[in-house]
Image: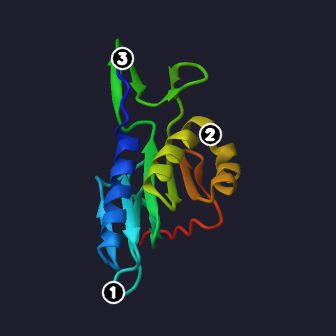
Amino acid sequence: MALDLGALGKGIALDRIARHLRRGGCPSALVNFGESSLVAIGRPPRGRWRVALRHPEGGFAGEFALDDRACSTSATWGQTVRLGRTVLGHIVDPRTGKPLRRHAQVTVLAPSATVAEALSTALLVLGPRALHDVARDFGIDACWIDRLGIRTTPGFGIRRAA
């Protein structure tokens, strides 16, 4: 067994980079740590930072604006391990000690990358019913995607991809 703090570590690193850029006077930047972890500083010179959100079944679910916020996407199928004939996901429910069985993806928009990383994984464990309560309690916006469809908090603002 191994404990991997990669996602949270990426969030901490992104926040440090963003803080350094802001202190250096950078008015606009998009820092990308591998598709699932982003920080937007300000807005680009023209328009807004537009981010395409992959759909777990293939293609894209849509796009959203990421202005002066961080974004993290967590999914249950991202990293897997095979145990005999069973494929297990990398996210474990701490209440049961077992890997999550649901096939879902959560994207969180938050003021910091550390918060976005932590809450995207936590929401996968808590399930879609927790989406609005967590969003309200932590001041974030979120998008849950599974086989039943796409659910968002009011401020997420996803537009269908063309």
**Residue tagged by mark 3?**
1
Q: Is residue 154 visible?
A: yes
Residue furthest toward the bottom? Answer: 46
Height in image: 1 above or below 89? above
Residue tagged 2: 127
Estimate how packed mark 1 is, as few (under 14), some (14 to 19) or many (20 or more) residues with alpha carbons within 10 Å.
Answer: few
Marks 2/3: CA–CA distance = 25 Å
Q: Which mark is residue 45?
A: 1
Q: Amino acid type of disc 2?
A: Gly
The picture places residue 83, in percent across and down from the top left corner, at 36, 14
Considering depth in this image, is 5 or 79 the residue closer to the camera?
5
Q: Is residue 52 above or below residue 136?
A: below
- Dot 1: what SS? loop
Q: Quadrant of residue 129?
A: top right
- Label 2: state its secondary structure: loop
Colour convention: rainbow
| Residue 55 visible in this rendered orientation of the protein | no
> Which residue is painted at 69% across and 56% down in the image?
136
Residue under the image location 34 percent in, 47 percent down: 10
Q: Quote the CA–CA distance across marks 1 and 3.
A: 47 Å
Q: Nearer the viewer, residue 9 or 65?
A: 9
Foreground: disc 2 or disc 1: 1
Number of marks present in the image shown: 3
Mark 2 or 3 closer to N-term? Answer: 3
Tell me the quadrant of the picture where the N terminus can be found: top left
Q: Quadrant of the C terminus?
A: bottom left
Q: Is residue 160 above or below residue 136?
A: below
Q: Which three-letter amino acid code belongs to the residue tagged 3?
A: Met
Q: Amino acid at mark 1?
A: Pro
- Considering the numbered disc 3 on the image, is that residue within a helix, a strand or a loop? loop
Residue drawn at (38%, 42%), measured in percent from left and top? 7
